[in-house]
């Protein structure tokens, strides 16, 4: 499937909650909170989204809430951190890694 992967891009306001000098995870984090998305199947995608003035990368549909790492981390580090949320054995690890790289490239070019 790797050759079929497509990066989707849209504007997404940063939902990071700021109270004085404290910042908290955006309440809106979920499968519809994204700036960058690469669909991996009918029900799963890897997304990049604004969080703490960075781009967080994780799976759109998670078993546990809020498992992601910043786009500046190494591709393999991100994949190993989020892989337990893949949720579909038909999605290849190679496609996940490629989706992460696509989002990293887009996030890096936007900053």
Image: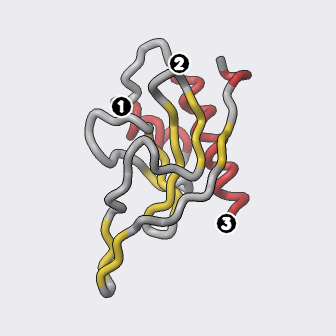
In what element is the residue under mark 1? helix
Q: State the residue at coordinates (28%, 44%).
A: 65
User: Residue 41 at x, y = what percent?
Assistant: 52, 21
Q: State the residue at coordinates (57%, 52%).
A: 35
Q: State the residue at coordinates (48%, 54%).
A: 56
Distance (Cα) linking label 3 and label 1: 27 Å
Is 4 drawn above or below residue 20 in the view shown?
Answer: above
Would you name the residue on which mark 3 appears? 111
Looking at the image, tell me whether mark 2 or mark 1 is earlier in sequence order. 1
Would you name the residue on which mark 2 appears? 92
Which residue is nearer to you in this view: 109 or 75?
109
Looking at the image, tell me whether mark 2 or mark 3 is earlier in sequence order. 2
Mark 2 and mark 3 residues within 8 Å of each other at the beta carbon: no
The C terminus: image quadrant: bottom right
In what element is the residue under mark 2? loop
Is 38 drawn above or below residue 36 in the view shown?
Answer: above
User: Residue 40 at x, y = what percent?
Assistant: 55, 25
Distance (Cα) linking label 2 and label 1: 13 Å
Label at residue 85: 1
In what element is the residue under mark 3? loop
User: Residue 43 at x, y = what percent?
Assistant: 45, 25
């Amino acid at each position: 499937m790797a050759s079929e992967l497509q990066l989707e891009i849209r504007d997404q306001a940063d939902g990071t909650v700021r109270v004085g000098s404290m910042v908290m995870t955006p309440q809106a984090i979920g499968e519809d909170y994204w700036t960058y998305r690469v669909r991996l199947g009918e029900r799963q995608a890897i997304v990049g989204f604004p969080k703490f003035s960075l781009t967080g990368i994780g799976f759109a549909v998670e078993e546990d809430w809020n498992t992601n790492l910043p786009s500046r981390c190494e591709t393999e580090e991100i994949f190993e951190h989020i892989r337990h949320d893949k949720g579909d054995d038909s999605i290849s690890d190679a496609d996940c890694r490629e989706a992460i790289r696509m989002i990293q490239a887009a996030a890096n070019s936007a900053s």
